[in-house]
Image (cartoon, rainbow, N blue to C red):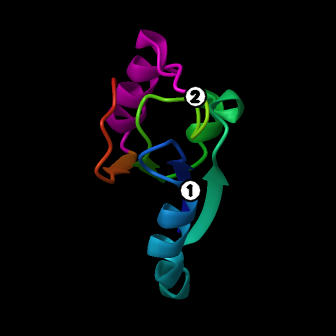
Amino acid sequence: MRTLVLCDDSAHPASLTRDGLAGLGDCGYDFDWLENPDEWSAEGMATYPLVIFSKANNRSRTEAAPWATEEIGAAFVDYVRRGNSILFLHSGTAL
C-alpha cells in the first residue's frame, strides 16, 4: 500500500521512524518519506490511502518553529472524512 510518512523533529527523529517501519516493506507497504514540511500539500496527501504521522508541530530537528496551521489541520480532517486513514505514532500535534 502506498503510504506517506510525515516524520522528523527533535523528539521524533526520521531515522527512528524509518527503522521502526522498515519491516513493513515486506508486507506490501511502499513508503514515501516527507521530512520537510514545506513539501507537504493537501493535494499531494490526497493521492495516498494512508498517512503515517510521526511528527510534533516542529519544522525539523533543528528548527522548533511550528508548521501546522489551522488550514493544515482542517486538511487532515477532510482527508479522513474522504475515507482515507491516518496512523499517529506517539506525536504531540497541534492538529
Picture coordinates of residue 50, whole percent (x, y): 45, 54
**On the image, numbered disc 2 is attached to which residue?**
42
Q: Secondary structure at mark 1?
A: helix
Mark sitting earlier along the chain (2/1): 1
Magenta span: 64-83
Picture coordinates of residue 69, whole percent (x, y): 47, 14
Q: Is residue 24 visible?
A: yes
Picture coordinates of residue 19, whole percent (x, y): 52, 74
Distance from label 2 to label 1 (Cα)?
21 Å
Q: Secondary structure at mark 2?
A: helix
- The relative height of residue 14 versus residue 65 in the rendered view (above or below) is below
| Residue at point 36%, 49% (across, down) | 85
Horizontal side of 81 relative to 5 (left or right) equals: left
| Residue at point 44%, 42% (across, down) | 55
| Residue at point 52%, 48% (across, down) | 7
Labels 2 and 1 touching (C-beta < 8 A):
no
Task: Say which amino acid is labelled 2.
Answer: Ala
For label 2, count other residues whose C-alpha is less than 10 Å away and answer few (under 14), some (14-19) or many (20+): some
For label 1, count other residues whose C-alpha is less than 10 Å away and answer few (under 14), some (14-19) or many (20+): many
Magenta: main secondary structure equals helix
| Residue at point 36%, 47% (across, down) | 86
Asked if the magenta segment contains residue 44, the reply would be: no
**Picture quarter containing residue 79?**
top left
Horizontal side of 46 relative to 52 (left or right) equals: right
The answer to which of 94 and 76 lies nearer the viewer is 94
Horizontal side of 40 relative to 20 (left or right) equals: right
Residue 61, labelled with which disc? none
The answer to which of 43 and 69 lies nearer the viewer is 69
**Picture quarter containing residue 63?**
top right
Find the residue positioned furthest to the right.
39
Q: Is residue 28 visible?
A: no
Residue 14, labelled with which disc? 1
